[in-house]
Image (cartoon, rainbow, N blue to C red):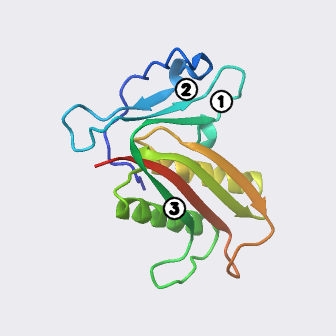
Amino acid sequence: MSLATAPAPTAPSAATPSSPTLQPHGPAAAAYVPPPGSQRAAPLALSFLNPDGLYDPRPNGYSHLAVAQGAARTVHVAGQGGEDAQGRLADGFAQQVAQALANLGTALAAAGARPRDVAKLTVLIVDHSEQRLQTFGQALMAAWADAPAPACTLIPVPRLALDGMLFEIDALAYVPAD
């Protein structure tokens, strides 16, 4: 499953002289600037950075930094869990992750956003383990296959809002202003 529908990112944008510590570097950096004349051609650029001196988070499906520059609408997506449109919770952790990511895609699309517009994710996992981290990381990398991985914080929790709920994800996105 992939939430991303946009073309592969262009070359990393150069950081401004006033922010030398945020310069993209090597293959760990990515940026997206809408092409001139496109419907999304607003002065917005999202850069995803993994600075030297920090471990490479890409195998876990995220970037250390997401920097938004320019005019944009801010979209806050509330926590999405593994329930379908009728409120039925999927069985099992992997199924809940898949459903929650599908729900996130639906919510983003309703706001005119795409995965490449997401700057930050917050993830809550009940009974967190290395196996659950790997399951989530693989699903997130698949969902963001055509977009740079956003900044992400994972928080292990003892319980979520619904009985049997094992996974929840929320998002912060910046969509170029119309």
Front one among 13 and 74 = 74
Figure quadrant of residue 69: top left
Horizontal relation, residue 102 to residue 167: left or right:
left
Disc 3 packing (10 Å; few <14; some 14–19; many ≥20): some
What is the x, y in percent for residue 41? 26, 38
Residue at image point 69% right, 61% down: 124
What is the x, y in percent for residue 100? 53, 66
Q: Which residue is mark 3?
A: 77
Whole-number angstrom distance, CA of label 3 to CA of label 1: 26 Å
Q: Which mark is residue 28?
A: 2
Horizontal relation, residue 98 to residue 135: left or right:
left
Q: Which residue is mark 1?
A: 56
Given the image, on which type of amino acid does mark 1 rest? Asp
Q: Which mark is residue 9?
A: none
Given the image, on which type of amino acid does mark 2 rest? Ala
Q: Earlier in the sequence, mark 2 or mark 1?
A: 2
Front one among 20 and 55 = 20
Mark in front: 3 vs 1: 3
Whole-number angstrom distance, CA of label 2 to CA of label 1: 7 Å
Front one among 55 and 21 = 21
